[in-house]
Every structure is written in C-alpha cells, then in structure tokens.
Amino acid sequence: MTLALAPGTAWETVYSRARSVIPAAFGDDGTLRNLYGGRWHPSRIAAAAHSPVDGSSISGAPLLDPDDAGEALRGAVEEHKTWGDTPLIERKRRVTAAVNSMRESRDTLALMLVWEIGKPWRLACADVDRCLDGVEWYVEQIERQLAVGTPDERTPLPGPVSNIASWNYPMSVLMHALLVQMLAGNAVIAKTPTDGGAACLTLACGLAREAGLPVALISGNGSRLSSVLVSNSDIGGLAFVGGRTAGGQVAARLVDTGRRHMLEQEGLNAWGIWDFSDWGELANHLRKGFEYAKQRCTAYPRYVVQRRLFPEFLEAYLPVVQSLKFGHPLAVENDGDPLPDLDFGPVINAKKAAELREKTEELITKGGVPLYRGSLADGRFLLHQDTSAYVAPAAVLSPPTSASLHHAEPFGPIDTIVLVDTESELLAAMNASNGALVASIACDDEQTANRLAGELHAYKVGINKPRSRGDRAETFGGRGASWKGAFVGGDLLVNAVSMSPSPDERLYGNFPSYSLYPD
C-alpha cells in the first residue's frame, strides 16, 4: 500500500489559509508574530520548529526578551482597567463573536494542531470543538456564575490573568481558559507552549482580538519570562499547566503573595482491578485510553491488577494493544479518501520519542517483564518519511522501583502493570506518585469499589469507567503534588478568576493552609 499526503493539507497550504484570515499575524516569510498592546509585533528571533509528523520545518514561536514581555504585560494591565467595566452583555457578545469566527476556521485550526503537535485529525477537531462548545456553555451560565444583580455579584481580579500551559491541548485547555477568563471581566496574557501550538494559538487569539477581546499572546523561554508572567505584582491571577518540576518553581515564586493561582501538574493516574469480571467493557476503555499516544494529563499509564485476575486481564489487554492504529495523521491511499482514523500519531518530538525508548529499556534492563513491544513497521507512513518522533506501544510488567517510570507518568504509549495480592497493596501501588488527577477502580461490587476509591489520592475516581478533565458543569483539580491552588471547571473556574464582595471568601482548592474538596 502506497500512501500520499492528503490534498490540501500541506503545511504551506494551511499556513497560507491562516494568513488570509489574519494577515497581520502571519509573515509572508512563514514567521509568526507576537500579539500585545492591541498590535502584532514581529520578533527578532524565531524558534526553529519541526513538525513531529514528518520532521519538516514549520513556523516556530516568535521569541520575546523580558523587556518586550514587560511591555506586553503593561498593555494587558491597561486593558484590564477598562475591560472589567464593559457591560456583561457586551462581553458575552464579543466572546460569542470570537467563538463563531473560530468555528468558521475550525478546519484550519485543527490542521495546524495536526502539524504542530501531531494530533490525528479526529482528535484535533475534537480539541477545537471542545473549546468552542465549552465556552458557549459558559456564555449561557455566566450571569448566574457571577451573581449579576445581587449583593454577592462577583467582580474581575485586580489585574490580568497570566496563562502558561503545556502543548498538548492548545484549544480545549488554554484557549478555552482565556475566553472564560475574559468573559468574567479579565484581560489575559498567555505564553505559547514551548513545544508546539504557536501557529494555532496565533490564529485563535487573532480571531479573539478581531472580536474586540483583550488578549495578549507572547512567546519566549519560560525561565526568562517568569519575572513577568509569574512574579510581577500587577498580575491578578496565574493559570499553569505543566510538569511538576516547572510547577514547583512557579509555586515557589508565589509563596506568600496571596495571588490567585491554579497549577495543574502531572501525576501517575492508575486503574485498579479487583474482583472484576466485565472484561469486554474494560477492553473498550483500554483502547480509548491510548488516544493521542497517552499524551494527556488524564491518561492511564498504570494498571494495578489483582494477581489471580492477571490471565483474564491479559486476554483483554493484548488484543487491544496489538490492534492500535498509529502513523502519519494525513496520509491517505487515494485522493478523496477521508483522513485516517488513527489512535495516535507521533509523540511531541524526536527527543521525547528517544526518551520513551530509553525509559522502556531501563524498565526491562532493571528487571521489568516486557509483555508487549510494538514495532514502527506496524504504522502507516509515507515512503521514506522521517519517523523519529514515533513510538510504538509497549507494556512492561512489574516496573522495578529503581526505574524512573515506577513513580512517574511516561506521557507516551508505554504502560506499566503491577500485580498485587491484597487491597492494601492495591492502594499503595495506585498511590505511587503522591497525588494524581484521576484514577479508576474496576470492581463488580460497587460498595467495595467506593470504599477503595475513598482511599485513593486522586481528585476524580471512576467506578468501572475512566475519568476526564471536564470543563463545563464538572469541576477539576488534583490531590497531593498533582495540583496546587484553586480548583477549576464549571462554577469553580469562574470563581477562581473573579472576586466575591466578601473579604472572607475561601476558594475550593488544595492551598497549603487548608484542604477543601468539593463533593
């Protein structure tokens, strides 16, 4: 079977399409521009960028130095002073206009996600759609959430909201948050993720700006810009999504500032299996769990299995992992064919792929048992294309305690499986990473499942089903080292980026001084 790039999906074509929508944001030389002070600014330096899909050159982030970033923040501060006084009906109108414009450019935004971060087409479209559908829900709910017209009416934060997010969900996490923050009356400033998504966010923020929204989008090295985006006293709140190392550094800068913050960090999400028999249903969840190569904060890379159930688990698990479809997200056999419906494409870059291979070897070298090791030969690729950012799925039994993946998530299609004999061992193995965002228990007896769930250090626990981030009516947070600060989602997201008239307001979250978890 010979595959070719689907017509009309080349990076140059997609870039040209975006440039025709927001000409000021995209240079005629393929470069991107920073957005601040209501204008687009070319950068003296652009980061080199290569698509994880095939290693080809794409537009890199336009890098700012701290002085220019300071100017961007000052512009956001000035906009914040007047935006909060804009009537809510007008804020709703502008946010709705931005959402409608993004919906018109939905395919361009999604194709940019394919090239920049390697999302298969179906998942890239879902990322855009979840953002837009979610924000529409907030537009409908915002008057109630802000308690408009009551003595408890909420007001914007004292300064703009700073946003630093990871690369894996530019639209449904970062852009979604920006739009809700602006809907609540705040100006916003965001840093493009270091590893990908700059072009997609440039187009999305450009459309928001054209709708009259106070958004700034800048790029640069996180450590160099932290004095502006994290420590500056003019910032009213900080939303961070990333790893524990960077998150810890951010948290250290926020100590004793009293500033609103929502710091989402990774954790080893685990699925425990105890006294269970519905293997067909579990197999369905297992396959879906591999979407986007498990590059999700709510992916499940660890399975903790009752030893006597291991044969049945293996019978359900192996056919799933052996049948996964991965490869070039835009490769088709014939012109006019639909884009392939893949479970995953590449991981974020060749460096990450090499790291995953090394960590898998470490697991095995130190005593882990290789249950399954896929091959790139099973993938769908163009002839002679660069495949250095692709990783075949793998599963390792009994990860040794000295290996890095014993306590940490791989952020890739690598599963580890732990066998246990007692409920205490099950709980200890599932709580291996000092807090997680989600967990699940597979158990036939609901009472037992709920009892075990109560002992897990995860914010959301599914009973015989996975849990996800959720960004509408359902709240989201973490326990232990997986989260710091205010919880978000639904009403809590609006609460986190607005102020109560009561000086004694206490936000839901896991702040150092208290721990309060909503039902």
Image (tube, helix red, strand yellow):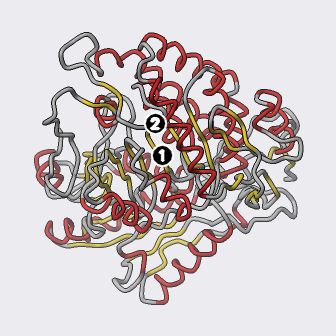
Task: Determine whether the residue tagged by mark 2 lies in a helix, strand or loop.
Answer: helix
Picture quadrant of residue 468: top left
Sort mark 2 into few (<14), some (14-19) or many (20+) by Cα contacts within 10 Å.
many
Q: Where on the picture, by quarter, is residue 180? A: top left
Total numbered labels placed on residues in the image:
2
| Amino acid found under the numbered disc labelled 2 | Ala
x and y percent of residue 189 in the render?
A: 52, 41
Q: Which image quadrant: the C terminus?
A: top left
- The residue that appears at 64% across and 58% down in the rendered structure is 65
Q: Is residue 193 left or right of residue 17?
A: left
Residues 355 and 492: in front is 492
Q: Is residue 273 above or below residue 90?
A: below
Q: x and y percent of residue 512 in the render? A: 19, 58
| Position in image of residue 419 (x %, y %) | 29, 73
Disc assigned to residue 177: 2
For residue 277, say whether it is visible: no
Left or right, 137 with respect to 153, comes to right
**Residue drawn at (78%, 33%), measured in percent from left and top?**
24
Q: Secondary structure at mark 1?
A: strand
Q: Which residue is mark 1?
A: 163
365 lies left or right of 462: right
Badge 2 vs badge 1, beta-carbon distance below 8 Å? yes
